[in-house]
Structure formats: structure tokens, C-alpha cells
Image (cartoon, helix red, strand yellow):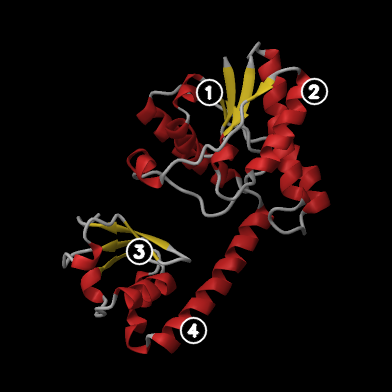
Amino acid sequence: MNLLHVCCAPDLVSTVVKREELTQSELFFYNPNIFSGEEFLRRYDALRKVCEKMALDLPEQDHFPEDFSDILDSFGTEHEGGTRCTKCIELRLRKTACLAKSIGASSFSTTLLASPRKSIAQITLIGDKLAAEFDIEFISGNFRAERDKSRDLLKGVYRQNYCGCLPSKNEAIRNREINDLRDRERLDKDFKRFVDLWNFRGNVIPRSRIHLEEISDLKRIIAIVKPSALFDDIRDPELEDRRWLKTGSYNCRIIREKE
């Protein structure tokens, strides 16, 4: 039996889509880093919804924010990806390995291996070290599934926009503000007559609202506005048979029916 540490609903879906055998795992939602208690419950509820869709058993789990307090106090000023993150991953995987050993599991793993924000190599290094310490196997690999394969399971499910802790939330907010300002200035400079399209940032944008014929210009404006999807309501022949509009810096999903 494998004990699978689960960090969030989207990464669980990606993990089991990519590695179907892990659906047989016992799930362990241990994430004391999450700020705040309300956010913890929101993520747990999202996880419960996808577990119901996939017929997976999800045990109840408390928050335990005090487990993360020493790490937060010592490394709270570091940027995302630094020592705080390393310590946080080790905290969660150590708890998982310890529990796995105590319940007689033969292995443990984590859905963090599906996270685009995390280093697979770093997680594997930590997991392998704990595997040796607890004399138990750590299952590693790339658990990042294609988005199309996960979309239906995540429909209507809350998806967080920061990793978990308060510093990561604040950093994510700052980065979004910086990116918003940069892209708004680019839109005003390069496509002044399309500044109203800024309202579609993060939302579905109809192709008919973008009065540009050249696909190169379309890609440029999509890369700036960053909509959640491009609705091909005019059946643009340039978009035929495409599921994604890849701009180099931003990949935008193409849909044919309004969501």
C-alpha cells in the first residue's frame, strides 16, 4: 500500500491521471503551511469534490498551522523557492513517511510532483533521503498531466493562485501587480485601439472582439491580455484544428463552445 501526500485538488487530479496506479493509495492531506484556516478549508473542500468524482476515499484532516510556525518565523522573508520552501516540503514529506511507516505502508509519495511551481529534482532528493531514513520506498517521477486530461475533473472546483503560506501569497500578489502593470503598458503602447480588451484578462475572450487578421498580431495581443481562453466564435480558419494558441510566453486554450 502507498501513502500519498496530497497538497491540493489540481495536483491530485494531475497525479492520478498521469499515474493511474496511484489511485489505490491512501490519501494524506497534511499542509500546515496553508494560510489561512479559511483557505485550508476551501482547499480541503475542493479536494473532497474531486475525490467524490474519482471515487477516492478522503480522510478528514486537521490544519496544524503550529507545525509550520518555526519555519515561517525563521525563513518568512525569503523568496518563493528558497530555504523556506525546502523546509516546508521536508516537513510535509517527513510527516508522510513517518505515518506511512507506522501504518505498514510499503511506500509513500506526494502530489507536489505534479506542481508546476515545484522542482521535481528537489522533491525527489528530499523524498529519497527520508526513504532511506525510514526504510521505505519513495515513489517519484513527473506527475504533471496534460491540462486537457484534467479539465473535466476540475470543472467547478476551486483552484488556488498561490502556493500556501502567507509569504507566498504576498509574493504572488506583488508579482501579479507587476505583471499587470507591465502588460497594461504594453497593450497601451502596441495596441492602443484595443485597450478595452484588458477587461478580458483572466476571462474568456471572443475571437470576434479582436479585429486583427494576422495570426502573429493575434498571438501578440493574446500574450499581453492573457485571457483564460480564446472563444473562436467566428471559426477563424487560422485556428482550425488547434486546441491551443501558443504565443511563446503564454499558451491560450481555444474553445468552440462558450463556457
Q: Residue 38: x, y in percent?
A: 55, 45
- Evaluate if marks 1 and 2 touch, with contact meaning CB atoms under 8 Å apart: no
Q: Residue furthest top?
A: 104
Circle 2: element type: helix
The reply, left or right, for residue 131 in relation to residue 181 is right
Image quarter hosting the N terminus: top right
> Tag on residue 133?
2
Measure how far apart labels 3 and 2 are at the Cα level: 47 Å
Front label number (1 vs 2)? 2
**Which amino acid, by three-letter code, is at mark 1?**
Pro
- Provide the residue designation for mark 1: 59
Rendered view: 148 above or below 256: above
Classify 10 Å Cα crowding around label 4: few (below 14), some (14-19), many (20 and above).
some
Mark 1 or 3, nearer chain start: 1
- Evaluate if marks 4 and 3 touch, with contact meaning CB atoms under 8 Å apart: no
Name the one closer to the observer, 30 or 40.
30
Classify 10 Å Cα crowding around label 1: few (below 14), some (14-19), many (20 and above).
few
**Which amino acid, by three-letter code, is at mark 3?**
Asn
The reply, left or right, for residue 83 in relation to residue 6 is right
Measure how far apart labels 4 and 3 are at the Cα level: 19 Å
Residue 85 appears in the picture as rendered: yes
> Tag on residue 108?
none
Residue pictured at 61% horizontal, 57% vertical = 169
- Provide the residue designation for mark 3: 203
